[in-house]
Image: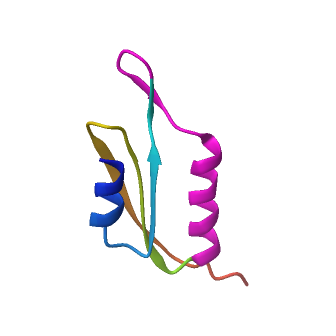
């Protein structure tokens, strides 16, 4: 599912975080990977971004339009 989502999504920035099962119905991903996704979105700005999680059986993806903030 992880590779399928990465290949199927059409966005400027695509981060699919690999979710690991911790216990029944509880998954987790590395916070460092989420921070990398956020940092890339802020750095690039003016783009579309897809950030999601996936395990072996399912995945969830959120899509964003990232704008640049005008600083005066």
| Count of numbered tags | 0
Q: Nearer the viewer, residue 1 or 43?
A: 1
Q: Please determine whether, in this image, residue 23 is positioned above or below residue 5.
A: above
Residue 48 position within the rendered picture, expressed as x and y whole percent measured from the top left: 42, 73
Residue 55, position as x, y percentages in the image: 36, 38
Magenta stretch: includes residue 18: no
How is the model colour-coded? rainbow
The spot of residue 49 in percent (x, y) is 44, 67
Q: Nearer the viewer, residue 62 or 68?
A: 62
Side (left or right) of 11 relative to 71: left
Q: Which residues are magenta?
A: 22-44
Q: Classify residue 37 as left or right of residue 5.
A: right
Determine whether, in the image, residue 72 is placed left or right of residue 57: right
| Residue pictured at 35% horizontal, 20% vertical | 25
Residue 43 lies in magenta, yes or no?
yes
The residue lying at 56 percent from left, 59 percent from top is: 37
Q: Pick out the residue farthest to the top.
A: 24
Q: Locate the C terminus and report the quarter of the image it occupies.
A: bottom right
Q: Which residue does the image show at 36% across and 60% down from the upper left?
A: 6
How would you classify the magenta stretch by its main secondary structure?
helix
Vertical position of residue 66 compared to residue 38: above or below: below
Q: Residue at x 43, y 76 (%)?
A: 12
């Amino acid at each position: 599912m992880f590779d399928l989502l990465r290949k199927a999504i059409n966005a400027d920035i695509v981060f699919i975080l690999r979710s690991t099962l911790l216990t029944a119905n509880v998954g987790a991903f590395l916070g460092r990977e989420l921070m990398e996704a956020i940092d890339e979105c802020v750095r690039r700005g003016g783009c579309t971004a897809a950030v999601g999680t996936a395990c072996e059986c399912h995945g969830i993806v959120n899509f964003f339009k990232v704008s640049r903030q005008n600083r005066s």
